Image (cartoon, grey):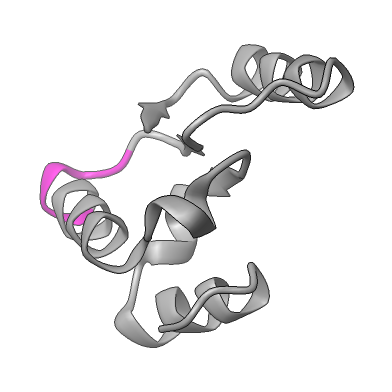
Amino acid sequence: MVVTYNQGDFKRLHEAWQAADRHHCGIIVGHKLPLGVLIACLERAARLLTPEVAQNQLLQLDLFDSEERSRAYLIALGGQP
């Protein structure tokens, strides 16, 4: 899994890999956050994401800002909370 603030380049890479039918472990993109918020979001993502759900996904870091929102995001991606 890759975590980056470089949304533009990694979105293009993700789209290029999809177009070429290549696979990746998942990419989490986001904006710079205060350190405590960043750590909380990353901890939630690491705890809740499975490799199967994250695979080939371009994930938004800010959607891991609360437990409830994280679980809803996982359900939308087709995973189990």
Front-most of 69 and 71?
A: 71
The image quadrant of residue 14 is top right
Left or right relative to 4: residue 33: left
- What is the span of residues highlighted in magenta in the rendered image? 33-37
Where is residue 59 drawn, in percent x and y?
55, 47
Where is residue 30 drawn, in percent x and y?
47, 38
The furthest residue to the right = 19
44, above or below 7, in the image: below
7, above or below 65, in the image: above
User: What residue is shown at x 31% (from left), y 68% (from top)?
Assistant: 48
61, above or below 71, in the image: above
Q: Quadrant of the N terminus?
A: top left
User: What residue is shown at x 52% (from left), y 73% (from top)?
Assistant: 74
User: What residue is shown at x 58% (from left), y 81% (from top)?
Assistant: 75
43 inside magenta stretch:
no
Front-most of 33 and 9?
A: 9
The image quadrant of residue 9 is top right
36 inside magenta stretch:
yes
Q: Quadrant of the C terminus?
A: bottom left
Report the number of numbered marks.
0
Where is residue 62 drawn, in percent x and y?
45, 56
53, above or below 10, in the image: below
The image quadrant of residue 44 is bottom left
Left or right relative to 14: residue 26: left
User: What residue is shown at x 44% (from left), y 25% (from top)?
Assistant: 5
Front-most of 6 and 79?
A: 79
Magenta stretch, main secondary structure class: helix
Where is residue 71 drawn, in percent x and y?
44, 81
